[in-house]
Amino acid sequence: MSTYRESIMSENVANRASVAPVELSSRAADEIRKLISEKNLPDGFGLRVGVKGGGCSGMSYLLGFDRKRDQDLSFEVNAINVYMDKRHGLYLMGTMIDYHDGLDARGFTFENPNAASTCGCGRSFG
């Protein structure tokens, strides 16, 4: 028989696992769906979000399509399957991914509340 504390801890872990660390704006979700359709991705592929060392501010964002890996957490965000290496959650928690299609800028942007500094292009952070 489990204790009340174990029950609450188990519930908290389950809830954290179901909450996506990133959000997609409606523009970003529309563009991702468009790319999925254009690329005719096979079943099992989803949007991979992550970080890697490098870039002018120390870390760079990763965004692409990939299959789920053993160390990944998976989430559904705006009806899109999102995969993220569980080690990257610390860096991405609360990040909003948007898409801009203007004259001065075009592409995906990341608004990360955890970033102490960012570069001018918005593709890397510290």
Image: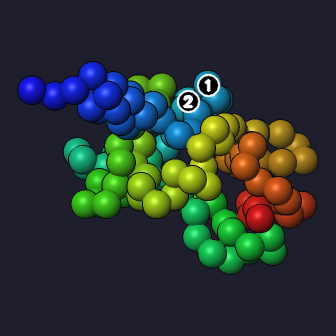
Q: Which residue is nearer to you in this view: 105 or 73?
A: 73
- Number of labels in the image equals 2
Q: Position of residue 56 (x, y in %)?
A: 81, 74
Instruction: Examine the rendering and report whether any part of residue 12 can be seen.
Output: yes
Q: CA distance from mark 1 to mark 2?
A: 6 Å
Q: Amino acid at mark 2?
A: Asp
Q: Position of residue 124 (x, y in %)?
A: 74, 64
- Residue 30 numbered mark, or none: 2
Whether 42 is drawn above or below 51: the answer is above
Q: Position of residue 90 (x, y in %)?
A: 57, 53
* x 88%, y 43%: residue: 103
* x 82%, y 56%: residue: 116
User: CB under 8 Å between callouts 1 and 2?
Assistant: yes
- Residue at numbered disc 1: 26
Viewed as shown, does residue 1 lie left or right of 29? left
* x 65%, y 42%: residue: 95
Label 2 secondary element: helix
Viewed as shown, does residue 49 lie left or right of 16? right
Q: Position of residue 9 (x, y in %)?
A: 34, 32
Closer to the camera: disc 1 or disc 2? 1
Q: Dividing the picture into quarters, in which one does residue 115 lie?
A: bottom right
Q: Amino acid at mark 1?
A: Ser
> In the rendered image, which quarter contains the C terminus?
bottom right
* x 68%, y 69%: residue: 59
> In the rendered image, which quarter contains the N terminus?
top left
Whether 52 is drawn above or below 44: the answer is below
Label 1 secondary element: helix
How many neighbours does mark 2 have within 10 angstroms: few (below 14), some (14-19), or many (20 or more)?
Answer: some
Q: Which residue is nearer to you in this view: 46 or 111?
A: 111
